Structure formats: C-alpha cells, structure tokens
C-alpha cells in the first residue's frame, strides 16, 4: 500500500493505537499486528506488520506497509531486535492483534501473554488469536480493501456478536491461564485455497498449552452456550434427518450448571440444564406437511443434546476444563479439591446434559 487518504490514516491511527498520540502523527511507525511462531530450530519468530507514515509535503503522505521479523530462544529481547530493523521507535506491546502459531501454542502461551500483561504500557485489549499453521502467514496476507488487522478485527467482532467465538483479549485471557480451576479456549483463524481469511472456531487448551483439538464455529457456539457466554445472539442450522434442516436464532438462553459429587468414590458429575427460546428462520420440510411445534421442539432438543455431548466429550479428550468445573469444585467441595490431582482427575468427570427448546416465533416459515 503506497499511499492512502488522510481520512484512512487517521482512522488507522485511532484503531491501532487506542488513544491519541500527543506528538505528530507523521513520520512515525505504527503496529498493524504481531505474530509469534516456532521455528524449525526451536526459536521464537516474531513478525510485526508495520505502517510507516511519511509526510511528503503538500498534504501528501506515503504509507509503507511491511513485515519485520526477528527470532530468539525466548520472547525477551525480540522488541529490541525489531526496533533495530526500522527507523524510529516501535512499541510491539501496542499491537492490536496478537497471532500465535499453533505449533508454538502447543509449547505454551504463558510467556507470550505475560510479556504483554506485565508491561505497564501494553495495550491489554489486544485480541489473542491462534493461527492454524503459522501466524506469520496470516499476518503477511495483503487484502485489497484494508490492512490485514482491519480484516481480522472485523471478522472477530462479527463472530463474537453471533456467539461463534469468545471475546478474548490479553486482559481476559491472562487470568484464565493462571486459574487452576478453569481452562481457556481461544479463537483461531485460517485461510481457504484463495487465501481468504476464515474465522474457523476455537482451539482447546489445557493450562497454557494448545491440546491439538479444535471445535468448528457451530460446535464453538454450542460450547459458548454451555459456558453461559451468549453474546447478542446465536444462529445455527440443525439437521434432523437427510430431508429436514432447521435454521434458528436464539437471543435468550438459560443455563444451569451444578455438580453432584460422591464423597466416598469422588465421582463427579456435571449436571447441565439448557433452555433455549428460539426463532425459526428456515425449515426445509416436505411441502404441505403440517408442522407439529411440540414435536419439533423435542426433535431439536434431542439433536442438540447429541451435539452438546460431542462438545463435552471433546473437552474431556483435550483435558480442557473450559466450563470451570474445577473452580466450582474447589469452592463447593474444598476438602475433596485439596486431595485430588485435578490434572488427572478431570478426564473422569461425567456430564449429564438436558436440553429444552421452546419455539417462540416462526414468522412466515410455517
């Protein structure tokens, strides 16, 4: 990107810095995003997408958009190395987007987020995202319409509102990483065969390490409902059989999570009750067939229960306590919590899921 209008420059500066800089907004280098990857020799590769704004005089500006890279054995010192590769001072802690490659995420993201969280000048609202493959490949994409950070942010915000992915920033992610009674799930991005960015779902973590197990956007939505993290709404399509699919939207979910603990055997059961009030947007059914609303409610509840069981089984397989069972156990049954190794015991948790669906609106569908 060689030149842009003053309007775009000002908008870009507002978005990427989060505050007005008191110095001149020209002849400066701004962060458009940062990624961290694991190299073949075990080092950490930091890639920074920078925008250098230069005043050419006469109201003309030139924007130089480039990717700067540096690698080290650990994250300390990478910002110094990056600064050596560009004129002026670049504060990598101000990155609005933090992409972490999945291979590095398997090693642990604690050191990376700590570097941002502990920095008193850091922008803790930076979005934390896992990249399928290498983060540097995502950061190096060149969309025709906007800088890559804009494209990622727009996609994330839309997916957050529709409860397809959780809202996670440095500020929200860090407490979960250091909480022994809960594990984090993070949004992940990938690209299609045309290098178009896709917000693909969530990656499941055990502690600060990515487990290698992920959930699609639809399954991620179900997980977020179980986590009681409905945002503006949730929309999904459920196949009841090969001829019938229901597309529905919900903005009202009641979730109840209780633990049942056998103190003698230490068997732990998570009882999950989920009630969804939904609006049916589309229903592919045979023409002329009368719709039985109560029957459809039950069919949807049955299918959703199966899919939610898939989600909880995935959590157990990944040893990812995203529902915070350990946190509830430690507060409600402290005597048991102190005696068990939760890292080993969590996989033995059983889930009892009950779903109730209530169709409130059908519009012109029926």
Image (cartoon, helix red, strand yellow):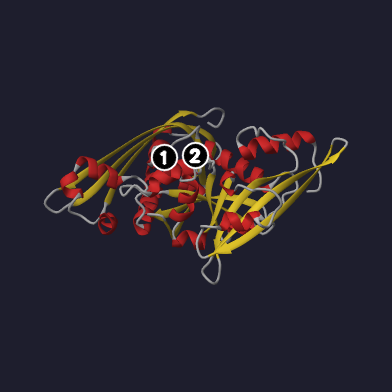
Pointer 2 residue: 163
> Residue at position x 45%, y 50% from top?
114
> Residue at position x 62%, y 40% from top?
154
Establish if 276 lies above or below 119: above
Q: Residues within 10 Å of mark 1 (few under 14, many from 20)?
A: many
Looking at the image, tell me whether mark 2 or mark 1 is earlier in sequence order: 2
Q: Confirm or deny contact between disc 2 and disc 1 (CB under 8 A).
A: yes
Residue 204 versus residue 164: which sits nearer the camera?
Answer: 204
Establish if 177 lies above or below 23: below
Task: Inspect this view and state whether residue 105 appears.
Answer: yes
Pointer 1 residue: 225
Would residue 319 be found to the left or right of residue 364 on screen?
left
SS of the residue under disc 2: loop
Q: CA distance from mark 2 to mark 1?
A: 8 Å
Give percent across and percent down for residue 136: 62, 58
> Residue at position x 78%, y 35% from top?
6
Residue 88 versus residue 277: which sits nearer the camera?
Answer: 88
> Residue at position x 29%, y 44% from top?
327
Establish if 360 lies above or below 157: above
SS of the residue under disc 1: helix
Task: Inspect this view and state whether residue 222 appears.
Answer: no
């Amino acid at each position: 990107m060689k030149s842009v209008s003053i309007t775009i420059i000002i908008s870009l500066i507002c978005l990427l810095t989060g505050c007005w800089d008191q110095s001149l907004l020209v002849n400066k280098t701004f962060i458009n995003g940062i990624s961290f990857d694991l190299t073949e020799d075990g080092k950490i590769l930091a890639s920074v997408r920078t925008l250098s704004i230069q005043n050419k005089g006469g109201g003309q500006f030139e924007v130089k958009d480039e990717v700067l890279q540096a690698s080290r054995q650990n994250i300390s010192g990478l910002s110094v190395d990056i600064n050596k590769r560009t004129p002026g001072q670049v504060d990598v802690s101000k990155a609005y987007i933090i992409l972490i490659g999945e291979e590095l995420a398997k090693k642990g993201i604690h050191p990376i987020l700590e570097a941002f969280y502990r920095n008193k000048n850091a922008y803790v609202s930076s979005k934390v995202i896992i990249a399928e493959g290498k983060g540097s490949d995502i950061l190096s994409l060149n969309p025709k319409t906007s800088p890559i950070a804009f494209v990622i942010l727009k996609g994330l915000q839309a997916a957050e509102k529709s409860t397809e992915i959780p809202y996670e920033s440095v500020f929200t992610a860090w407490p979960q990483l250091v909480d022994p009674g809960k594990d984090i799930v993070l949004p992940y991005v990938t690209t299609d065969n045309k290098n178009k960015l896709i917000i693909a779902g969530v990656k499941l973590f055990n502690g600060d390490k990515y487990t290698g197990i992920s959930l699609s956007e639809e399954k991620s939505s179900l997980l977020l409902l179980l986590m009681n993290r409905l945002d503006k709404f949730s929309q999904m399509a459920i196949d009841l059989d090969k001829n019938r699919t229901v597309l529905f939207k919900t903005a009202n979910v009641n979730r109840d999570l209780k633990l049942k603990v056998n103190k003698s055997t230490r068997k732990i059961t998570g009882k999950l009750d989920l009630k969804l009030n939904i609006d049916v947007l589309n229903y592919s059914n045979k023409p002329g067939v009368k719709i039985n609303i109560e029957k459809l409610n039950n069919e949807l509840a049955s299918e959703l229960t199966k899919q939610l069981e898939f989600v909880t089984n995935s959590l157990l397989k990944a040893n990812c306590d995203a529902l915070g069972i350990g946190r509830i156990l430690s507060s409600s049954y402290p005597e048991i919590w102190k005696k068990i190794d939760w890292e080993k015991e969590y996989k033995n948790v059983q889930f009892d899921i009950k779903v109730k669906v209530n169709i409130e609106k059908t519009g012109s569908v029926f």
